[in-house]
Amino acid sequence: MFLSNASAYSFEAAGSIQVLTNVARFRRALPSSIAWSCTTWYAVSGSIGSSASANLGRSVASPSREKRGLISILLRLGAMILLLGVRVWSAPGEIYHENSPEGVYPMKTAELLADALGRVRGVVHEVTAGLTPDQLAWRPQPTTNSICWLIWHLTRVQDDHVADVAGTEQVWTAEGWADRFALPLDKSATGWGHTPGEVAAVRVESADLLTGYHDAVFDRSIRFVEGLTDADLDRIVDERWNPPVSLGVRLVSVIDDDAQHAGQAAYLRGMIAHR
């Protein structure tokens, strides 16, 4: 449908207001590849009202009531057809929820996992920012953990577990981080069962080494979880437990462990600030 001088003034309360308030809703529901064309269709067929005509500097005649009624019907019909297309177009496994906020697709499990991992990453950066090597290695008691060890350990656990379920080599060895840290520990160590002496051995010369390694692991983890479907989460990845561990349970376990240690590191940072 194209606008003419006679029709440009016809999109009043019956058509343009309803269409304009629904544009954002349809843009959120549609994938980015077709959202722009959807909005363009609305702009051509229903969003140019009196203000737009004035901006064009034209003096247009008001169409007859019959024409206004016909255009309003056509606009409503077009909106119904577009909505039907959104429902039919849905990608595999996606369901369009008409009553959900703004009519958008619900969050996928993969997006939820990615969000949780991202929150851990945020804490890692906040906790280590501006700390000296001695502050990173500080422990309240000889048998407790340091910020350095906690961040290294939670990153090693994520690296080890995600690499195992993804069937890839750990970032720790594949990208040379074990050599950069040069810790007096076995390269396969993740911190599990460490003695106080081994905890004390985990030191770095800069917080950038800790955050750099964590960022590299985070990027690998995100690439993995973004490709998962809900059905993938039921895959059994560890039969040594009863019941056997599924992929979904393993990933939640990683996030839970990481979040706990990130919180412990944040608490230590508060103690350091008040020493």
Image: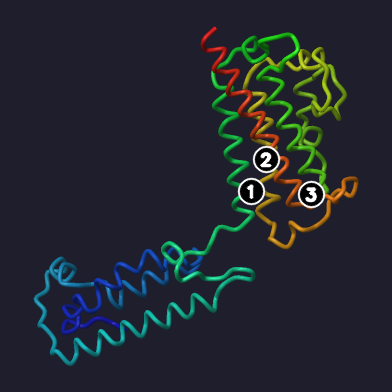
Name the mark on residue 256: none
Residue 66 is situated, as x and y percent measured from the top left of the image, at 17, 92
Cα gap from disc 1 to disc 3, whole angstroms: 15 Å
Amino acid at dot 2: Ile
Cα gap from disc 1 to disc 2, whole angstroms: 8 Å
- Res 88 quadrant in image: bottom right
**Tags 1 and 2 in contact by the CB under 8 Å rule?**
yes
Q: Is residue 139 above or below residue 21?
A: above
Name the mark on residue 113: 1
Question: Image point 36% across, 75% down: which residue?
Answer: 41
Question: Image point 84% across, 25% down: which residue?
Answer: 193
Amino acid at dot 1: Leu
Q: Which residue is mark 2?
A: 255
| SS under mark 2 | helix
Which is in the foreground here, disc 1 or disc 3?
1
Label 2: how many Cα within 10 Å (few below 14, some 14–19, many 20+): many
Q: Which residue is mark 3?
A: 166
> Is 263 situated left or right of 83 in this image?
right
**Tags 2 and 3 in contact by the CB under 8 Å rule?**
no
Q: Is residue 182 above or below residue 23?
A: above
**Tags 1 and 3 in contact by the CB under 8 Å rule?**
no
